[in-house]
Structures are given as C-alpha cells and as structure tokens.
C-alpha cells in the first residue's frame, strides 16, 4: 500500500499551518500560545522562584521543572481524566531534557524555573507544540538562553518520508513511523529524539534530513511571535 | 499587609470607588467566545478583565443512577491550573476548585437547565453523561462567575457525537444539541462593611468580609446560592444581595 497523497493535501515536506503568540497569560513571568494544525498549546513560565520543599533545592544551580498536561476536553476521543498519566509524566521529562541544554541556571541557586504546558486541543504533535511554546515562553520571561529550541515530528507513512504528521496520518492503515525531534536551530543539535514504528537506518537519515528545510521555518515563527510582543510603539 | 489593603479598599469604597477605578456595581469587560475548542463537543472561552478560562464539554455514555433510572446526568470539574497563577500548584483540585465546580454544578442541575430525562437512551442501562470541564488560563479574581458563564455557553453550543447504540464516534458530530430549558447565570456579590460590590478583583477577594454567589435563571428564579467569607450577613443584606445578583445577571445574560 503506497501513500501518494497526504490526507490533508500537504506536500510531504510541508508543515501544517502554524500560529505563535507570546505573552498570552498576564500572571506568568513569560508565556506563549502555539497552534500547529489543530493542536493548540499554552506554555507559562514562573520563576526563577524559591523552590519548596527545601530538600529539592540545589545550592549550585537552579532547576528546571516542566509539566505537560492535556486539558480534559483536549483529546479527539473520550474525555481525558485529569491528574496526569504515565504518558504525560514521560513527556514532561523529555520536554525538560529538550529545553535544559540552552539554559544556564547557575545564577539562580536554590531556585526553580517552572514551565507549565497545557494542551487545549490535540491532533498529534502535542509534545512538539508544547516545546515550541515553552521556548517562546522562556524567552518571554527574560531567561538567558543560548538557543531557541523547537520541535517537530518527522516520519514515514507506508514508505513515504514526511514531516509533521497529523492524527489521521499517525493512525493511517499500514506502516506508520512517528519520530518527534527537538532541535537547537543554531547548532543543529538534537535535544529530544523519540520514535515509534519500524524504520531502517537509511530512512531515519532521510527523515532527519528533512529537518534542514523546516527548522528555519518554525524558528522564524517563534522569533516573529517575540518580535510582535516587544515591537516599539508605532512599529509595524 | 492585608490589613492595609483592606483599609485602602474600605476607604475608597466610602467614596463609592474601587482601587482599580471601577464603580461598586461595575463589571470588568466581559468577553464570551463560543465553540473555541475543536476536540470538545461544546466549548467556550470567557474573559472577565484579565481572568481567562476555557470550558469544554465532553459527552460520554454511562449507566443511569439506580434511583433515577430514566435520567442522564452532568458532571462539573474545575482545574485551577498552575499556569494561571503563581499561587496555584499542580495536583488534585483543592478546596476552592471543588467549591467552584459544585456551585456551577448546582446552578445548572437545580435550575433543570438540562432536561436529564432526555439524556436517557435506555432506562436503567444507557444514558448520556455531560462532562463539563473548566480550566483556568489566567486567574485574576471572580473565577466562579466566569466559570458559570463559560459552562452555560459551552452547553448551549454542544453538539452530540454520533452514537450507534454500541460506540460513540467522536469524529462525527450530529446536528443534535443538548436539551436545554433554562439558562442560569451566577453572579457573586461581595460585602465590605456596609458596602456591596460585584465582580471582585484578586485583591478584593483576599480581604472581603463576605460573599454570596447567586445563580439566576432567565425567568428570574434562583437555582443556587453559596455564601463565603468569614463575616456573617444579615437577612436584610441577603435581600439586597439577591436584588443585585438578579439585576447584574440580566446584564451579563446579554453577552451570550
């Protein structure tokens, strides 16, 4: 079974429409909203702030704490029970690892930077949307970063290599491989890499090769979101 | 510090003004958006000033309660998400979130806003359960009124998913809405000394004497009440607070 035409009519190297906005939650120190296709993510950053209970504190440096959460109505199917799952725990952890390499928290001993990622609607790619939003929110919070992480999935549907799988592709009949990747656009380094499905080494190379084209596109949308918030009065 | 805050609020109120410049009976701007969440069967986003929250409805097939075998039911849940305030922590709903969801639940349930009998599919065996979930995005006071308004708006634009007797197909929405017969809207009236205000800000909530939330239907009947705060209120004050809630709910009703 081949896959000649994508279910939503996109080219194989084409991202879904993406919208990003910085500064959407006034209470947070930094925040962002990212919509990729039908997946919508909010990220809010609080901190650096004091960390309690105190035994969690690190006197050498601040710590980063991420929480990925799906709102109960955000799934395409049944209601998602609130309170977290094994899946959300794992995603929270890999998100933390995806963001941490760009931060230097030595200046903030005994503190925590909290990153809360909330999904209000999902249609595949929710951890990637969450990471893109979290990176904007961290920058919005004024936390020093040496790069702006972003994430996107690449993969394979019936031998066809493609980017940014939507839900109908993830559940396409036949062989599907989904590979979420977080990238530091300046160096090209990878900070998150997961995969499910079955794939050859050559195909992995081909799939990761597609990142070259889409990473700058996503990066630009993130940068524009921040520029839009911080533009001078009267500036277009 | 809170004593100072309270003194300032009371001093301003003695001249009929509030710390943010509002009149005692003035709401902040109320913005209601319906149908904002594609994955939900019904949804709303409501903003009152900088308070901002989402409400989504998810339909589910369940078994009727043994004592009401010919009725479906609703379930209201509120998540005070840590993204929305530096004071909220991750974890199961706390007292305030539980209070909010129960007050919103009663407003809808007791006004018979939803005809529970029409949610029954097969008596004693199958019925629709209407899950109403409220998630805060930015908490800046008066979450109860904001949530109540979002809940009724979300119910109004809910479309049932397809159900073939065995399975629900959430990818296919039907044209059928919920059997809605009433439209309750909660308004919280807050007491400071001799003065009353509506739509309390975060600061006002911190130091209020007493509050009374009243859910008012479009007929002018009252379907839920909840008194909060540490000070008692007199019968005469209840009377005045009810009048205020009835008047304000009619005003808010125009927003949906």
Image (cartoon, coloured by chain):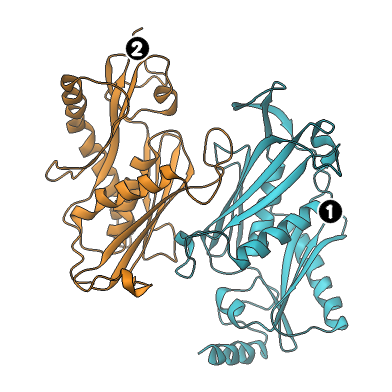
Q: Which image quadrant for residue A66?
A: bottom left
Cα distance in 3D space between marks 2 and 1: 53 Å
- Percent across and percent down for residue B136 are 54, 58
Residue displayed at 30% across by 33% down: A153
Say whether residue B256 is visible.
Answer: no
Residue A139 falls in image quadrant:
bottom left
Chain A's colour is orange
Q: Residues within 10 Å of mark 2 (few under 14, many from 20)?
A: some
Disc 1 on helix, strand or loop? loop
**Residue indicated by mark 2:** A3
Which part of the image, by quadrant, shows the N terminus of chain A? top left
Give SS at disc 2: loop
Quick check: A64 left or right of A190?
A: right
Measuring from the top left, give residue B255's x and y in whole percent.
69, 54
Picture residue at 20% right of the left edge, 38% below the top: A216
- Please say if A200 is above or below B144: above
Residue that protrudes farthest toward the top in the picture = A1
Q: Is residue B82 visible?
A: yes
Please say if A9 is above or below A140: above
**Colour for chain B in the figure:** cyan
To which residue does mark 1 refer? Answer: B111
Task: Report the front residue among B50 and B168.
Answer: B168
Residue A142: x and y in percent read 27, 64
């Amino acid at each position: 079974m081949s896959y000649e035409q994508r279910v939503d009519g996109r080219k194989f190297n084409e991202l879904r429409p993406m919208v990003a906005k910085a500064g959407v939650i006034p209470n947070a120190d930094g925040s962002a909203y990212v919509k990729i296709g039908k997946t919508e993510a909010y990220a809010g950053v609080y901190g650096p702030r004091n960390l309690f209970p105190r035994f969690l504190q690190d006197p050498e440096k601040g710590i980063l704490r991420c929480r990925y959460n799906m709102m109960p109505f955000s799934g395409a199917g049944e209601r998602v029970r609130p309170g977290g799952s094994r899946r959300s725990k794992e995603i929270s952890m890999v998100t933390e690892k995806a963001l941490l390499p760009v931060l230097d928290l030595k200046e903030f001993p005994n503190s925590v930077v909290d990153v809360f990622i909330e999904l209000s609607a999902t249609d595949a790619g929710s951890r990637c949307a969450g990471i893109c939003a979290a990176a904007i929110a961290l920058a919005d919070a004024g936390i020093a970063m040496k790069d702006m992480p972003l994430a996107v999935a690449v993969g394979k549907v019936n031998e066809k290599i493609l980017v940014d799988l939507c839900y109908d592709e993830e559940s396409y009949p036949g062989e599907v491989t989904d590979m979420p990747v977080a990238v530091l656009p300046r160096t090209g380094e990878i900070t998150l890499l997961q995969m499910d499905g079955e794939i050859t080494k050559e195909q992995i190379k081909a799939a990761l090769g597609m990142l070259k084209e889409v990473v700058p596109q996503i990066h630009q949308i993130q940068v524009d979101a921040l520029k839009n918030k911080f533009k001078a009065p009267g500036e277009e | 510090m809170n004593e100072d805050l309270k003194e300032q609020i009371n001093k301003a109120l003695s001249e009929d003004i509030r710390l943010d410049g509002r009149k005692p009976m003035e709401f902040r701007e109320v913005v209601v958006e319906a149908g904002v969440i594609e994955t939900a069967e019904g949804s709303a986003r409501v903003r009152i000033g900088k308070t901002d929250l989402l409400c989504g409805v998810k339909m589910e097939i369940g078994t009727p309660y043994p004592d009401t075998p010919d009725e479906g039911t609703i379930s209201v849940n509120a998540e005070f998400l840590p993204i929305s305030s530096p004071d909220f922590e991750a974890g199961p709903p706390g007292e305030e979130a539980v209070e909010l969801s129960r007050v919103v639940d009663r407003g809808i349930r007791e006004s018979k806003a939803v005809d529970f009998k029409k949610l029954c599919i097969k008596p004693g065996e199958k019925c629709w359960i209407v899950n109403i979930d409220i998630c805060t995005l930015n908490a800046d006071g008066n979450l109860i009124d904001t949530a109540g308004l979002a809940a009724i708006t979300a119910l109004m634009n809910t479309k049932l998913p397809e159900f073939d007797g065995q399975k629900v197909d959430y990818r296919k929405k039907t044209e059928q809405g919920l059997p809605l017969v009433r439209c309750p809207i909660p308004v919280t009236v807050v007491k400071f000394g001799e003065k009353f205000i509506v739509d309390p800000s975060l600061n006002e909530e911190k130091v209020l004497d007493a509050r009374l939330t009243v859910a008012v239907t479009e007929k002018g009947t009252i379907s839920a009440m909840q008194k909060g705060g540490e000070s008692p209120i007199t019968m005469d004050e209840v009377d005045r607070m009810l009048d205020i809630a009835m008047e304000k709910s009619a005003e808010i009703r125009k927003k949906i």
